[in-house]
Image (tube, rainbow, N blue to C red):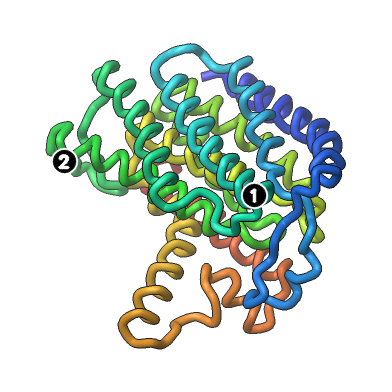
Amino acid sequence: MDYQLLLLTIGVSFILAVIAAPLLIPLLRRMKFGQQVRDDGPQTHLKKAGTPTMGGIVIILAFTLAFLKFSVINTDFYVLLVATLGFGLIGFLDDYIKIVFKRSLGLTAKQKLILQLFFAAIMCYLLIKNGHSTAISVPGTSWSFDWSGWFYYPFIVIMMMAVTNAVNFTDGVDGLLSGVSAIAFAAFAIVAMQATSLSAAVCAAAMIGAVLGFLVFNAHPAKVFMGDTGSLGIGGAIGGIAIVTKTELLFIVIGGVFVIEMLSVVLQVASFKTRGKRIFKMSPIHHHFELTGWSEWRVVMTFWAVGIVLAGLGLYLNKGL
């Protein structure tokens, strides 16, 4: 596989994001697309109110242009495009409704579910048409199981919903999701190269450049937030790559930070509903550390470090080291 092509993809996507962000941020300000901040969250976040959001448009735009330019056109290409742009569109609609119509919850749960099922179903159709393997491998072992498409494709639908929501939960501190996702995409780029899936490798490379370019403006203190437009698009891309490279369960390791964030929310809600007590000061867990006195920078650096360790472990389990 052409490593120079991947480096070129990263570079082009990065430059596109760095060029697009300064053009979009003033536009978002003029349109008053500002972030709404929760009153019950860390008090240091209150000063972020009004910071432009929906900056994920920059990520999606830079990614799409680079991906279309450098990827080969095959079934994997279309699956990854639907995963990224489809779920990114859901995030865009959610952000737009929150801001323009002043509905704090954006899309209703039912609307989100229908849209997620729709795009996941398109992905499944493309995979079935291409004769995609329904076997699932267990990372770090030679064991795999194949319970046929009746199990696999519902699993894929649930996986896409879980991955995108887990990534979405990770967005909440300046630069946190941008950095953690860049690390995860770097690991999955290596996985894709080992699987000889050029489309998946280029997808990961295009996303690396896009999120790092966005990070230039999203690092603390953030000049723009990505919103659900960016976080759901990123989640769609990660989930799509794991599926087309047949490393579905490896996401649990490489994307371990996302999994931890989601579990912290699930445990918090379950504990409060069953015991009337909270496990964390606030969930997702990055807010818990903020409320214990950690600075945003310390939270971000710690989570990035954990992401690097888990990415390395994932590559090791995938026999990549």
Q: Is residue 312 in view?
A: no
The residue sitting at 85% across, 34% down in the picture is 23
* Dot 2 alpha-carbon crowd within 10 angstroms: few under 14, some 14 to 19, many 20 or more: few
Amino acid marked by disc 2: Phe
* Dot 1 alpha-carbon crowd within 10 angstroms: few under 14, some 14 to 19, many 20 or more: few
The residue sitting at 87% across, 41% down in the picture is 26
Image location (x, y in percent) of residue 319: 37, 41
The residue sitting at 41% across, 87% down in the picture is 277
Q: Which residue is mark 1?
A: 101
Image location (x, y in percent) of residue 80: 46, 27
Q: Is residue 117 in view?
A: yes
The answer to which of 209 and 312 lies nearer the viewer is: 209
Which of disc 2 and disc 1 is earlier in sequence?
A: 1
The answer to which of 151 and 33 lies nearer the viewer is: 33
- Tell me the CA gap for discs 1 and 2: 47 Å
The residue sitting at 76% across, 28% down in the picture is 16
Image location (x, y in percent) of residue 20: 79, 32
The answer to which of 265 and 39 lies nearer the viewer is: 39
Looking at the rendered structure, which numbered label has been put on residue 145? 2
Helix, strand or loop at label 1? It is loop
